[in-house]
Amino acid sequence: MAIASQYNAKQVEDKWYKYWMENGYFHSEVDEREPYTIVIPPPNVTGVLHMGHMLNNTIQDVLVRRARLKGYNACWVPGTDHASIATEAKVVAKLKAEGINKNDLSREEFLQHAWEWTHKHGGIILEQLKKLGASCDWERTKFTMDEDMSASVIKVFIDLYEKGLIYRGYRMVNWDPEAKTTLSDEEVIYQEKQGNLYYLNYKIEGSEDSLTIATTRPETILGDTAICINPNDERFTHLKGKKAIVPINNRVIPVIEDEYVDVEFGTGCLKVTPAHDENDKMLGDKHNLEVIDIFNDDATLNSYGLHYEGEDRFVVRKEITKELEELGVLQKIEEHTNKVGTSERTGAVIEPKLSDQWFLKMKDLAQPAIKAVVGDDINLVPDKFLNTYKHWMENVRDWNVSRQLWWGHQIPAYFYGDGKEEFVVAETLEAALEKAKEKTGNQRLQISDLTQDKDALDTWFSSWLWPMSVFNGILEPENKEIQYYYPTNDLVTAPEILFFWVARMIMAGYEYRGERPFKNVYLTGIVRDKQRRKMSKSLGNSPDPLGLIEQYGADGVRVGMLLSSPAGNDLMFDEDLCKQGSAFTNKIWNAFRLVKGWEVSEEKEQPETAKIAIKWYRAKFQKTLQEIEDHFSRYRISDALMATYKLVWDDYCSWFLEMVKPGFGEPVDGETFKEVIAILEDNLKILHPFIPFASEEIWQEITGRTPAEALIIAEWPELESFDEGIISEFAVASEVVTGIRKIRKEKNISFKNEVEFKVLNNERTSTYFDPVIIKMGNLSALEYVEKQVEGALSFRVKSNDYFIPVTGAIDVEAEIKKLEEELNYTEGFLKSVDKKLSNERFVNNAPEKVVAVEKAKKADAEAKIEALKASLASLK
């Protein structure tokens, strides 16, 4: 069958992905082989493929495909995350567009809409990953809201509660007023923002005195319940025991003393608003201050806001500033830079808020997770993240695991009693009733007396169990799959979720299985544009991943993504890299076409050049294979690709095939052809993890293959000993051939014409590659001489001199004429430069850099003239 002249990525990719799926190559079952397991970082169920996903999943697929070739039972578990905040926001927005208010729905009605949304949009990103070539075990696809996954989450919550690790507490939390839910500390992004420091005067009750406070949030004065001074600050001794009057609402509040106050900041007088600042809350607890919350859940002001009730906090900030100025209370405003917490999910400015929430004690859980990473039981790649991980884990705070959302795992706590303040934690309503009866001794309690907590669990509370729950290791801890596939081998993820997810998975692994969840954590960089900006939809600097695949093919995009993505370092993405990847795929295809186009003769004897070339390439292949294995062992995926790229492009396509190809119109001998095909097949094996589609297409085109012989399940080449000497000798020989070709090109010596070649072998270099030099230089003879060859074209490699005698090689008269014309032009150019430099006015008045450039031109022209004269002398 004729080989297509052009590589058609789209046809090839659709064909082989379908073939791989139909033959079950991605699927894994427990067997006698050693497993290699990766669990996907589950993307949001509502998400679509972006450049970060492309990078992350390309790396995972490279690792999985290589493991499969190396004989491991490779299992890559895909799935999606229910993403409480993001998904609920999308569903609420959809309902709003349809004229439906979430608050008018029951929880069950809302969840029905959420499930409809999920079923419609949930599989999009996984389908897109297939276009990239991701060889996930799709039969194992999991969703964090699957029945068994949800049961695992509830079981763990109850277990941790019964161990005393989960508790309910009234604490200051991070409140997202847009999503109307709490966030954990890790979900708050602190950004430096330019704001103002407002200096306000508070009157002292019963006197004409006043004090001045400085605040960045003037709207919160309506919740002030004290003014605090440092007892050691002599400036305010007269205020001790006094009371101040809050502007606008005229609330009378005490002046308290505490060394917490920084005498250097602001005025030294601190307004205390316990409901809206964590440090103020600590002061409030210490001094028994009233707590006044002035905000609604959406960060508009409530009734404590007086005439600002219902207005947004930032609108109020502007309006209250005007009112304070009109009242004569505003003394001055200064520019002030401070760190503002924003929601990782919605971007809204976080509001500190006091609330009853569920918390997980982290300190004890963190200890084995610290020991695992610091002690090398788990490797972070690159290890530059180790200190960051250690610092965070050693200073970990309790995890706020409750969210004021309906989409997610509803907290299995059931309240009862007159004020619904008592509660039990149980898997079902029926089990909760029995626990409540036992706890109260009241056997007359009924299910109708119980109310389940409305809140849902933080999404990360399900995904921290991911490596275990995907194998049902929580519900059935002794099942054969969790025993076989866990712990997993590698985790590939982004550094920004090192604490959201990675650290928590490690904690869960040691808590529930007493061992690590994975051995290696490969932390990818951020995909940025050429201006070093993070790629995002909002900036409009992120290309459509599927558009790139359409244009350059999946293989081209995979190579483009990996060419510059060292672990942990950001990738400066340039679409030209995908173009380069596509060109690489085409280069391999064209090389294959060349080989398949040769006529084969079984009678023809194998030439010496082919024997030498095969021996050299096999040594070079083994040396490169050794390098590739080393790169993979250190997770230098980009370096492993580059080593493969250079081997195939430079050594195989540019040198090896040229060395072994038969003369024009001649057949290739059978032995050489057999070796060339075997070498090609080895190349395809090491290429397959990076360019799976083109490699499988060529593999299948070489000869008819059965499904059991597909490249995807072939055997990775074995490491063997090799001759380092032949590689060094070829390095010299290739320089010699390059020198010959350069002279031929410069002197217009046709490559069709054979030329003589003489060598002054000063270093006594090996003559092993002489047949190759003769063939690739198209030489009539190669002769070793004892002295310089006068009147010859020459070059040097190492300390050896190589000569092509002029006689018969070039048209001497034509070359002399060409050189004389070039000499005349250069001498004329030198005169014009000399004239400029001899002009004192120019030299004294022109910028120093301009004069330096002219002097450099003069030196270059003089050197060129000398070289041209030498060349002419050798020809005359």
Image: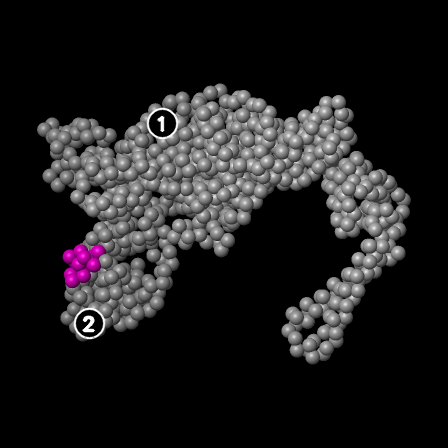
Circle 2 crowding by C-alpha within 10 Å: few under 14, some 14–19, many from 20: few
In this rendering, position of residue 540 left or right of residue 149: right
Task: Return the disc, 2 or 1, that comes first in the chain's sequence.
Answer: 2
**Can residue 630 be seen?**
no
State which quarter of the image contains the C terminus.
bottom right
**Residue under pointer 1:** 472
Point 59% across, 31% down: residue: 3
> Which residues fall within the magenta stretch?
300-311
Kind of element beneath mark 2 = loop
Q: Name the residue type under label 2.
A: Leu
Point 41% across, 29% down: residue: 138
**Residue under pointer 2:** 327
In this rendering, position of residue 566 left or right of residue 811: left
From the top left corner, tell me how far across and down residue 359 is, in percent. 28, 41
Its colouring scheme is one colour
Q: Determine the residue located farthest toward the left in the rendered image.
A: 444
